[in-house]
Every structure is written in structure tokens, then in C-alpha cells.
Image (cartoon, helix red, strand yellow):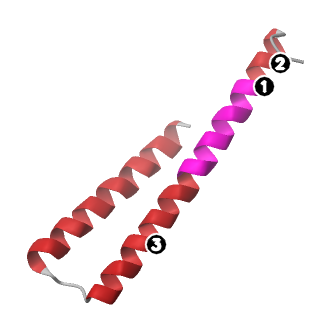
Amino acid sequence: MKYGSIICTGLFVLGVALSLVQLWLTPLSPELFFKLIVTIGAFFVVALGITLVCREYVSDKEMKKKGYID
């Protein structure tokens, strides 16, 4: 879960940094910039989903071990 948070934060910061660089310097074509932002967003969503599913699984496992749920 800690790794997922780090990955999501890194992807978010990368997206913001790329957007700011594109805004001020325009080193990329608009098509390439759009593709990169969409790719970063997709990786962010996948990493967030995996992190949430793993957290839920670990939480349920601990609750079953303690006898709170069957």
C-alpha cells in the first residue's frame, strides 16, 4: 500500500511537471503531449485501483483473523 501511494504521487507530480513544462516551453507537439498525459493518467488509475484492492484484501483478511467477519 505504501508503494502504491508513492507510485500514484510520483505519477501525479510527473503529470503536473509535464504540464507546466509544456505550458511554458512547449517542447512537445500537442498530439504527443496529449498521448503522454493520457498514458500517465491511465497508469495512475491502474496503480490506484491495485492499491485500493490490495488494501481491501489485507483489511478483510485481518478482520477475519480477529473474528469480526466470517
Q: Position of residue 10 (x, y in %)?
A: 37, 53
Q: Residue at x 24, y 85 (%)?
A: 28
Q: Is label 1 in contact with label 3 (beta carbons under 8 Å)? A: no
In the drawing, what numbered circle is on residue 32?
A: none
Q: Earlier in the sequence, mark 2 or mark 3?
A: 3
**Residue type at numbered disc 1:** Lys
Q: Secondary structure at mark 3?
A: helix
**Residue type at numbered disc 3:** Thr
Q: Residue at x 63, y 49 (%)?
A: 50
Quarter residue 56 falls in: top right
* Residue with the most extreme top position: 67
Q: CA distance from mark 1 to mark 3?
A: 33 Å
Query: What secondary structure characterizes most of the magenta part?
Result: helix
In the drawing, what numbered circle is on residue 39?
A: 3
Left or right side of 40 for 66: right
Residue under numbered circle 2: 64
Q: Quadrant of the C terminus?
A: top right
Q: Earlier in the sequence, mark 1 or mark 3?
A: 3
Q: Residue at x 32, y 63 (%)?
A: 15
**Residue type at numbered disc 2:** Lys
Q: CA distance from mark 2 to mark 1?
A: 5 Å
Q: Is residue 54 magenta?
A: yes
In the drawing, what numbered circle is on residue 61?
A: 1
Q: CA distance from mark 2 to mark 3?
A: 38 Å
Seen in the picture, residue 23 relative to 41 is either above or below; the reply is below
Q: Residue at x 15, y 73 (%)?
A: 23
Q: Position of residue 51 (x, y in %)?
A: 59, 44
Q: Quadrant of the N terminus?
A: top right
Q: Which residues are magenta?
A: 48-60
* Label 1: few (<14), some (14–19) or many (≥20) C-alpha neighbours in 10 Å: few
Left or right side of 4 for 32: left
Q: Position of residue 62 (x, y in %)?
A: 75, 20
